[in-house]
Image (cartoon, rainbow, N blue to C red):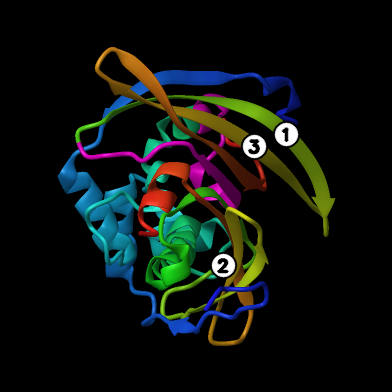
Amino acid sequence: MTIQAGFEMEWRTLPPVTIEQLRAYAEASGDFNPIHLDEEVARRAGLPGIIAHGMWVAAQLSESAQSFVRSEPSLQGYQLIQFHSRFKAMTQLGDTLSIGGMVREVREREIWIDLQAKNQRGEVTTLGSLTFRRSAIFGESKRF
Amino acid sequence: MFSLRHEIGQEAGPYSEKVTQERIIAFCRAVGSVDERSAPPTFLTIFRKGEFDLFQKLGFDLAQVLHAEQEYAYEGLILAGDTIEFKTGLTQVLEKQTRGAFLQFLTFETAFFALRGTELIRMGHSKTKIVIRGAISG
């Protein structure tokens, strides 16, 4: 089966966001902005409380897109060439995010995928779009 | 709060950072990546030192910064053992008056290169758009 525009990926729901997760992400990414780690600083900055790193949510979008592309036989050899994410709403501790996605466009050697993260209230927190391109070398050889 | 428009063109770097297998694995675990052999797409976020240094240089408080947009263009795969060289610049400042608040959207662009042998190979490019809310300290 060939993937076509409009194909919807299965939704993936993540466990509630914890402070331990954000600490591990701060360590791994080097982003120690205190609004992601310190409740008091976050409130003083006018936020409702600690908020998750936007890039942690973006990483969840790209994980979903990549595992879709890797598991799809007709997309073997496709490499990510572009990733754009937009942060629409904050994610707080305890929030439960669900990640969904859809194939927006399929071209001869490219596939464009749009993704979104929604919280438990149904609000879209993050939008992402990724472009994968079939590499001339890997793409051809893996078809045989 | 004063305008940062006149700061367009400010640069930071070049910086040089070693990518170890441990760093890739720690990042994969932090984002729940199933494939720990390669660096996830958002791994480029570990090279934000130029942005953070510019935040400081421009005098605003990290707690007033929210991430608005992030764009990556990939030209090569970063591998364990690579030394990544990168340089960051402030390329755009947009000002917005919303519901009585003065917001400034700043775009920082970073170019990434891997030093392989004696060659610098282009690995990609990033555009980070952040929003600064409220007053600038200092």
Q: Is A54 placed left or right of B16 in the picture?
A: right
Specify the farthest residue to the bottom.
A121
Residue with the mark numbered 1 = B93
Residue with the mark numbered 2 = A90
Q: Where A120 falls versus A65 (above or below)? A: below
* Contact check, label 3 and label 2, Cβ < 8 Å: no
Closer to the eye: label 3 or 2: 3
Instruction: Identify the element where label 1 is drawn.
Output: strand
**Distance in Å between CA atoms under marks 2 and 1:** 22 Å
* Residue B55 on the magenta segment: yes
Query: Residue, x 22% and y 45% (percent of image)?
Result: B23
Q: Where A23 falls versus B53 (above or below)? A: below
Query: Residue, x 36% and y 56% (percent of image)?
Result: A142
Q: Residues within 10 Å of mark 2 (few under 14, many from 20)?
A: many
Camera-side residue: B23 or B2? B23
Same chain for the residues under marks 3 and 1 in the image: yes
**Distance in Å between CA atoms under marks 3 and 1:** 7 Å
* Residue B56 on the magenta segment: yes
Instruction: Give the magenta range.
Output: B54-80
Quadrant in the picture for residue B15? top left
Same chain for the residues under marks 3 and 2 in the image: no
Instruction: Identify the element where label 3 is drawn.
Output: strand
Q: Is residue A23 visible?
A: no
Q: Where B131 falls versus B84 (above or below)? A: below
Instruction: Identify the element where label 2 is drawn.
Output: loop
